[in-house]
């Protein structure tokens, strides 16, 4: 069980472009967790960004652990942030799998951006993106 | 922890280093003591390559050793796995150099040593024989060194001769000594490493065996664990720190190694938590030792999370809250440990590492507090008290090592759980610490989350005020970043605060936002909506006390539609304004009133162009709708990105002089909106501080609608309007009881116009040009404006004779509405009196258009070009532009002014119409001897084709003897556009003389080519001819030279010019004074001139001369001169010109009027031969001649009028043969 959220950062605001989570009681908590994780994402971007903006790794790794979740981050070159939250009890997911999930997300997101009718900055409503995320969630739950 | 085995040496340095492999020393202790320092120093100097088993990569290591005195107890017992206390090498030291001593004591001692070793299965030993020269000297019976060595080797080293080493003169500085030292050290290292490898390998094997047995019953993890730990520690001891630390996990302690826990493990009694704690404490010690304290915090957090998870997974039963206590204690313990080893600056720089633990501790304390009822206002109940007691009991007694520190985590927890007050103190302390740290490292979101949980705490404590500040801070961040769920949640909390604080207005605003929040359930939304409605309907003692709320949370303005679409109406017309409001409320809301305030900007009535030409407003679509961007009031992408599209315009800067492009660019017209600071966009969400923005503008004009029920979703509300002016919609306000929902700004700007217009009359031609002489239609347009045309209103046109108005019976007017739709038709009645034509208009409502057409005729003036005949030479008309006449493609124009009296004004309107004459006429006089002809050329200068008929030429005053004989075709003739029609008349007269002046009128009828015959209109052209009759004939003849039959080129010929007077003195001549009375005979002087411009002839001798002619009929004068043809062929005669010669007595003032000077161009023109007799011009006229004339009275030359001189031989030619010599014809062929 995990949540996937992408965030956009064309402007200083980090408003969510797409939030998807397994429906549960603690959805609100997910949101708070992910929102807070942006702090760490920004911290990582800014510290890494100074060092080598060019060959920056997109995958930021585990942002921070909480008692219940593990939060992973990924930032595209255009500073679009992806966050995946995994339940802490899910020990079967390896770092590499998370990494490949992010890569999939990124590819799918690129497809969304390529859509000429998509207005960058709008919430993502693409069905293709939706189904890709659903598939990922089913697969890894 | 490795206590010295025996304090036999004073040097503490040896024994404090616990982490070295043990090497035992037997034999001569004093000898070893002397060598020890050198040995310990030399041993680690050079690295050794350590080859390891199982394919692990070899490693270079520096060996060190802990030398201890040999004791039997040191040797490991069977099964003892203590690697650290294991002696790896046993060395026997001796300096014995004499056989006696050796045999007597040393050998025995060695044998005993060997025996002990063998007993314990240890084969790692070494015998060192130290030789010193000094010792040798003292003894007499010295054996060679080798013999002792050999003996020892013989006795002990059966096959291992390398286990006996000699060390010669170790304390001396000599090459020999150095050599022996180095070989000794190499041996020592090799043996040590060998033993180490062997023993470690054996140990590892044991461990693996143990691991393989793990499925067997009775296998103890603790045993295995201890074995592994030992191995690792051994490696650590050897500084071989490429540890597989991953397998380490554990927890906190102040002592380097928690022996208590270790014992527990060794006794296989440890709990999972104990084990983990133990492991972590070891790790912690290691990391701090390695100067990596920040990794400790990270691992601590990880460990704690893992433990909690695992306990949950394993469903280990723990007392409720016990885990929280454990986590709390652990966090603080680690933090204390870290604080203990770092200074303050270091800590501050690494808040990012520690803050996680702080927050975790805070969270745990909070949950403990909630669990134990320490957070509620009323304090804990009995159940909660029981729980607290259980937890405190579970903590057990404080450990002795921390008992003395007043700030120990244990004490803190105990204190926090003991009372409500102290809990608050500790909780706030922790929270604020975490908050400050987050702020310090710039993690504002995390800080706000802590703030939110603080707010929850304050709410529980009933301190809504403090809670609100934290909540508002968080809300700001969530809204600006568009996180809907957190926004909703935080808002709900804020609403609760505001309700408690009795902040009515803010509470209502928040309620409105919540009622429209799609994240909430219907019940919740209805609840908040009901809160608003309840308040609104409360009877308030103060009626004026109204609450203004932002409309954006209540309803959204989606669309606005104008009817009519142009949003421009005249006064009195109905303009409908339809608003589409999308209600966000979950239930229908009845609004008492919806009002739109409009801003009125005064505009001069009438300056705005009429409804037809009114410009389209920006943002208004052609069907009159304005669509407003959908904005989400509570969250979502900020408006700046969604709402305002860039309004870009191309901008070009051209230079004013030559219109070249200076610069070009793109301009954004709504920058001020796009660059608006983000604070202002979110201001609506902040109930505070925005109250001033929500007040309705006072005194503004309002559009109102009463009693509207707003259903959830789309609604439409209709307004209608108003008075003249331009209005801008400013605000929208919906009133529900005491509550007003105000939309403070309407953007994009919406304007509509209500205008008032003055009546207007325009007259314009239907065709491009109005033609004079033909009936033409003109259109009258009356824009009524605010004036109502009543029955009996009439236009009074002042008649002018040159332009009568033709009124036909079937004249009707159209009435159009302001949008140019046909409303009706009505007949016009036109009454014409002598002076005035009156057109009575049909009744027309205001702001309509009345159109009708009339036919007018403009008479062509008979002689429009009178002024041009000023200097006629032969009747040709030379046009010069004149002020009165304008030319439009060669047409003369006539301006006609019409004065009109309108019923709406006391002033007359003067309207000017321009007509164009379709024809241009020219006349000329032609002569043939005495016979005269008049030619009239009629040119069609218009674009229309005409039929011309009935051309006649008449005299104005009939001369009885004169007859004009038409030589023209009778039938009507078609004259196409730009073509000419020539007509010719012969003049016949019976009497001898003609009147000197003839005034003629040319008349013709014309009609457009496609018009019926009846539509013929007259055209007349008046002109005047003077001095018509021929006075002289000039005749020239060229004769070949005498004796020749033909003229030849190059030879002189005779030119004979004879001038004959045809008539007696005419009336006109008599009046002139040019004739001179001499000897009773009237003579007049003529000047002739022979000119050949074409260089055919060479005039030899005098080419001009004066002739005195008697004024009598048939008087002839002949002149002869020599000319020479220059070419052969048929040559035209040279031209002969005749002028009147006026003597100098003539008054000079006449010079200007009868100037003989003509420009050269005309003279050239005169040469073109034609039937017409042309006025001969004196070519002598030159500028100096003229100047002479001016200064001195001089005789003058005056040309004759056309027709007065007839040149009989004007176009005659004479055949000239080539000169006789030139009978060779040159032919050039190219």
Image: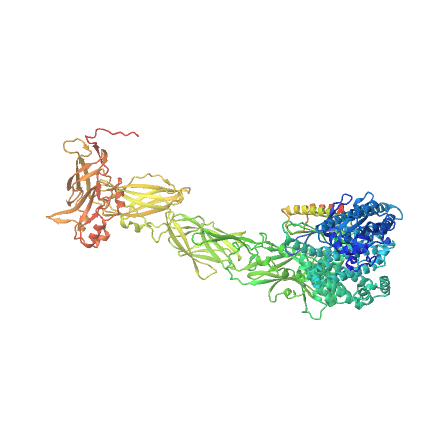
Horizontally, residue B766 falls left or right of residue B440, namely left
Q: Position of residue B539 (x, y in %)?
A: 72, 68
Going by the picture, which residue comes out furthest to the right? B218
Q: Which of B885 and B369 is in front in this view?
A: B369
- Count of picture labels: 0
Q: Is residue B343 above or below residue B1221?
A: below
Q: Where is residue B598 in the image (x, y as percent from the top left)?
A: 59, 62
Going by the picture, which residue comes out furthest to the top? B1224
Q: Which of B1110 and B188 is in front in this view?
A: B188
Q: Is residue B270 visible?
A: no
Q: Is residue B1175 above or below residue B1148?
A: above
Horizontally, residue B820 falls left or right of residue B882, namely right
Q: Nearer the viewer, residue B1080 or B213?
A: B213
Horizontally, residue B531 falls left or right of residue B383, namely left
Going by the picture, which residue comes out furthest to the bottom? B541
Q: Which of B797 and B196 is in front in this view?
A: B196
Q: Is residue B1161 visible?
A: yes
Describe the colour scheme in one phrase.
rainbow
For the N terminus of chain B, which image quadrant?
A: bottom right
Q: Where is residue B163 in the image (x, y as percent from the top left)?
A: 80, 46
For the C terminus of chain B, which image quadrant?
A: top left
């Amino acid at each position: 069980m995990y949540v996937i959220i992408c965030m956009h950062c064309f402007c200083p605001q980090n408003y969510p472009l797409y939030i998807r989570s397994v429906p549960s009681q603690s959805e609100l908590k997910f949101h708070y967790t992910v929102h807070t994780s942006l702090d760490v994402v920004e911290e990582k971007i800014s510290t890494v960004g100074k060092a080598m903006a060019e060959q920056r790794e997109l995958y930021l790794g585990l942002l921070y652990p909480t008692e219940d979740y593990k939060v992973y981050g990924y930032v595209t070159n255009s500073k679009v942030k992806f966050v995946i939250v995994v339940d802490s009890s899910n020990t079967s997911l390896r770092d590499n799998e998370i990494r490949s999930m992010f890569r999939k997300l990124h590819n799918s997101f690129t497809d969304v951006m390529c859509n000429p009718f998509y207005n960058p900055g709008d919430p993502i409503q693409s069905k293709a993106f939706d189904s890709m995320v659903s598939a990922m969630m089913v697969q890894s739950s | 922890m490795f206590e010295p085995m025996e304090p036999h040496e004073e040097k503490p340095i040896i024994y404090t280093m616990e982490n070295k492999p043990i090497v035992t020393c037997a034999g001569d202790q004093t000898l070893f003591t002397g060598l020890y320092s050198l040995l310990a120093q030399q041993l680690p100097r050079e690295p050794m390559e350590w080859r390891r088993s199982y394919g692990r990569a070899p490693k270079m290591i520096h060996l060190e050793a802990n030398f201890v005195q040999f004791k039997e107890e040191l040797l490991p017992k069977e099964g003892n796995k203590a690697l650290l206390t294991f002696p790896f090498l046993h060395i026997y030291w001796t300096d014995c150099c004499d056989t006696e001593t050796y045999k007597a004591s040393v050998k025995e001692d060695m044998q005993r040593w060997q025996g002990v070793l063998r007993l314990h299965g240890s084969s790692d030993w070494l015998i060192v024989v130290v030789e010193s020269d000094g010792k040798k000297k003292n003894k007499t019976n010295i054996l060679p060194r080798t013999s002792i060595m050999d003996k020892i080797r013989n006795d002990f080293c059966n096959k291992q001769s390398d286990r006996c080493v000699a060390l010669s003169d170790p304390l001396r500085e000599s090459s020999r000594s150095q050599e022996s030292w180095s070989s000794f050290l190499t041996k020592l290292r090799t043996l040590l490493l060998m033993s180490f490898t062997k023993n470690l390998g054996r140990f590892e094997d044991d461990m693996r065996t143990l691991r393989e047995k793990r499925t067997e019953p009775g296998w103890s993890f603790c045993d295995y664990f201890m074995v592994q730990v030992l191995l690792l520690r051994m490696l650590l001891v050897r500084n071989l720190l490429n540890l597989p630390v991953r397998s380490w996990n554990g927890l906190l302690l102040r002592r380097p190694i928690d022996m208590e826990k270790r014992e527990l493990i060794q006794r296989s009694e440890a709990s999972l938590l104990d084990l983990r704690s133990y492991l972590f404490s070891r790790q912690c010690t290691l990391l701090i030792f390695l100067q990596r304290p920040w990794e400790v915090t990270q691992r601590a957090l990880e460990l704690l999370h893992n433990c909690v998870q695992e306990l949950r997974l394993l469903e280990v039963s723990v007392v409720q809250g016990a885990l929280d206590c454990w986590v709390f204690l652990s966090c603080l313990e680690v933090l204390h440990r870290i604080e203990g080893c770092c200074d303050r600056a270091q800590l501050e720089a690494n808040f990012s590492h520690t803050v996680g633990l702080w927050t975790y501790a805070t969270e745990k304390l909070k949950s403990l507090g909630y669990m134990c009822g320490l957070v509620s206002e009323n304090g804990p109940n009995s159940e909660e008290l029981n729980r607290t007691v259980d937890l405190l009991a579970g903590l057990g007694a404080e450990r002795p090592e921390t008992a003395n520190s007043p700030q120990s985590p244990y004490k803190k927890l105990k204190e926090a759980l003991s009372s409500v007050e102290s809990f608050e103190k500790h909780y706030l302390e922790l929270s604020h610490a975490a908050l400050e740290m987050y702020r310090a490292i710039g993690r504002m979101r995390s800080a706000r989350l802590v703030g939110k949980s603080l707010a929850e705490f304050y709410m529980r404590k009933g301190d809504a005020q403090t809670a609100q500040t934290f909540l508002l801070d968080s809300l700001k961040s969530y809204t600006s970043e568009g996180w809907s769920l957190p926004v909703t949640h935080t808002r709900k909390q804020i609403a609760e605060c505001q309700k408690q604080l009795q902040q009515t207005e803010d509470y209502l605003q928040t309620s409105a936002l919540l009622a429209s929040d799609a994240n909430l359930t219907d019940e919740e939304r209805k609840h908040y909506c009901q809160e608003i409605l309840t308040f609104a309907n409360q009877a308030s003692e103060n009626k004026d006390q109204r609450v203004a709320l932002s409309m954006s949370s209540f309803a959204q303005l989606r669309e606005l539609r104008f009817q009519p679409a142009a949003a421009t109406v005249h006064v009195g017309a109905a303009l409908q304004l339809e608003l589409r409001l999308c209600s966000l409320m979950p239930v229908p809301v009845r609004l008492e009133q919806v009002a739109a305030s409009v801003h009125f900007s005064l505009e001069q009535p009438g300056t705005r162009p009429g409804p037809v030409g009114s410009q389209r407003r920006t943002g208004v679509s052609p069907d009159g709708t304005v669509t407003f961007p959908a904005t989400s009031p509570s969250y979502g992408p900020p408006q700046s990105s969604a709402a305002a599209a860039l309004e870009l315009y191309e901008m070009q800067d051209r230079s004013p002089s030559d219109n070249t492009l200076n610069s070009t660019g793109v301009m954004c017209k709504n920058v001020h909106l796009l660059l608006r600071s983000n604070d202002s966009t979110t201001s609506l969400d902040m109930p505070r501080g925005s109250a001033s923005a929500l007040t309705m503008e006072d005194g503004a004009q309002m559009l109102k609608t009463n009693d509207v029920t707003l259903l959830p979703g789309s609604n439409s509300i209709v307004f209608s309007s108003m008075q003249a002016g331009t209005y801008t919609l400013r605000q929208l306000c919906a009133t529900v009881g005491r509550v007003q929902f105000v939309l403070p700004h309407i953007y994009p700007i919406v304007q509509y116009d209500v205008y008032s217009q003055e009546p207007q009359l325009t007259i314009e031609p239907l065709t491009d040009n109005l033609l004079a002489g033909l009936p033409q239609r003109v259109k009258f347009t009356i824009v009524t404006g605010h004036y109502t045309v009543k029955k009996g209103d009439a236009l009074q046109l002042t008649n002018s004779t040159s332009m009568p108005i033709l009124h036909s019976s079937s004249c009707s007017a159209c009435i159009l509405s302001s949008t140019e739709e046909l409303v009706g038709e009505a007949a016009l009645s036109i009454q014409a009196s002598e002076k005035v034509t009156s057109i009575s208009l049909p009744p027309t409502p205001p702001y309509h258009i009345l159109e009708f057409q009339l036919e007018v005729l403009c008479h062509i003036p008979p002689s429009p070009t009178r002024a041009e005949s000023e200097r006629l030479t032969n009747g040709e008309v030379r046009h010069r532009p004149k002020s009165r006449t304008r030319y439009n493609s060669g047409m003369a124009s006539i301006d006609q002014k019409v004065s009109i009296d309108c019923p709406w004004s006391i002033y007359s309107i003067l309207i000017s119409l321009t007509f164009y004459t379709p024809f241009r006429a020219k006349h000329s006089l032609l002569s043939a001897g005495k016979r005269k002809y008049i030619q009239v050329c009629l040119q069609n200068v218009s674009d229309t084709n005409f039929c011309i008929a009935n051309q006649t030429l008449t005299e104005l005053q009939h001369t009885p003897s004169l007859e004009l004989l038409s030589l023209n075709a009778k039938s009507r003739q078609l004259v196409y556009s730009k073509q000419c029609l020539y007509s010719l008349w012969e003049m016949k007269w019976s009497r001898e003389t003609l009147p000197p002046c003839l005034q003629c009128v040319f008349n013709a009828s014309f009609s457009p080519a496609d018009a019926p015959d009846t539509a013929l209109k007259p055209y007349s052209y008046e002109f005047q001819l003077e001095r018509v009759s021929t006075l002289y004939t000039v005749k020239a003849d060229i004769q070949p030279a005498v004796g020749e039959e033909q003229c030849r080129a190059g030879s002189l010929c005779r030119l004979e010019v004879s001038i004959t007077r045809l008539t007696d003195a005419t009336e006109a001549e008599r009046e002139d004074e040019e004739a001179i009375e001499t000897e009773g005979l009237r003579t007049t002087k003529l000047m002739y001139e022979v000119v050949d411009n074409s260089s055919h002839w060479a005039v030899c001798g005098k080419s001009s001369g004066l002739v005195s002619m008697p004024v009598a009929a048939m008087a002839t004068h002949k002149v002869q001169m020599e000319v020479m043809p220059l070419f052969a062929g048929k040559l035209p005669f040279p031209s002969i010109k005749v002028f009147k010669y006026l003597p100098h007595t003539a008054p000079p003032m006449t010079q200007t009027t009868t100037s003989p000077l003509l420009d050269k161009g005309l003279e050239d023109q005169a040469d073109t031969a034609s039937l017409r007799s042309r006025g001969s011009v004196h070519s002598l006229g030159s500028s100096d001649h003229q100047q002479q004339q001016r200064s001195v009275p001089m005789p003058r030359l005056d040309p004759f009028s056309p027709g007065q001189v007839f040149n009989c031989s004007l176009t005659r030619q004479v055949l000239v043969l080539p000169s006789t010599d030139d009978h060779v014809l040159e032919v050039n062929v190219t």
